[in-house]
Image (spheres, helix red, strand yellow):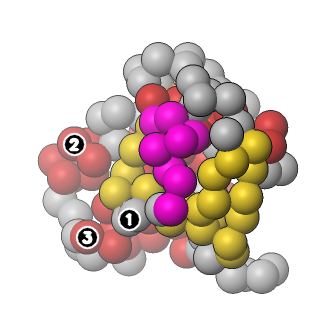
Amino acid sequence: MRIELTVNGEAREAEVWPGESLLYALRERLGLPGSKNACEQGECGSCSVLLDGALVCACLVLAAQADGHAVVTVEGLAEGDDLHRVQAAFVEAGAVQCGFCTPGLVVATADLLARVPSPSEDEIREALSGNLCRCTGYAKIFDAVRLAAGS
Ligand code: FES
Ligand code: FES
């Protein structure tokens, strides 16, 4: 089946299998490998994207469900060569080790700060509770979120 959607502000089309995930379509059909496939079961958040402005796990959404909708991936956050402030904060805080969780954490953090510009510690932890990191121990990730929030 053919789907038409907006991805990172651009009209895109793809031929997909009816049972195919949005994550697969983004990575394999649309040339956007930023969203990572670490569990494919909705457990880790590495595939986090915005679907019509709502944070979702792209591995749990069918590509067909995105037909006619707008998706923002981690590739859509930077403005040209200028990193999104969350991306810059992750770099500055050293919040990246293997980097597998990073795209999802960046998208989830950008979503949090768009909704709650100055989040409390509890709000940060709650917002990122669906994003698992196997490497960093989270301290530097939380530093990066505070840095991006300017707190
Ligand atoms: S790959 Fe989607 S939640 Fe882990
Ligand atoms: S940096 Fe390796 S999983 Fe988070």
Which residue is at a point 68% across and 29% down the rendered structure image?
17
Distance between mark 1 and mark 3 Cα atoms: 11 Å
Mark 3 falls on what kind of element? Answer: helix
**Residue 57 locus on image (x, y percent):** 45, 37
Is any part of residue 38 visible from this angle?
yes
Which residue is at a point 63% across and 60% down the rendered structure image?
4
Going by the numbered disc 2, the residue's amino acid type is Glu
Above or below: residue 26 compared with residue 44: below
> What is the crowding at mark 2: few (fewer than 14 residues within 10 Å), some, or many (at least 20)?
few
> What is the crowding at mark 3: few (fewer than 14 residues within 10 Å), some, or many (at least 20)?
few
Tell me which label, 3 or 2, sits earlier in the chain: 3
In the picture of the structure, the residue carrying the numbered disc 1 is 53
Residue 85 shown left or right of residue 111 in the figure: right
136 is within the stretch colored magenta: no
Distance between mark 3 and mark 2 Cα atoms: 13 Å
Residue 57 shown left or right of residue 117 in the figure: right
Q: Which residues are magenta?
A: 61-68
**Residue 104 locus on image (x, y percent):** 53, 44
Going by the numbered disc 3, the residue's amino acid type is Arg
Q: CB of residue at label 1: within 8 Å of ligand 1?
A: no
Mark 1 falls on what kind of element? Answer: loop
Which residue is at a point 34% across and 73% down the rendered structure image?
114
In the picture of the structure, the residue carrying the numbered disc 3 is 115
Mark 2 falls on what kind of element? Answer: helix
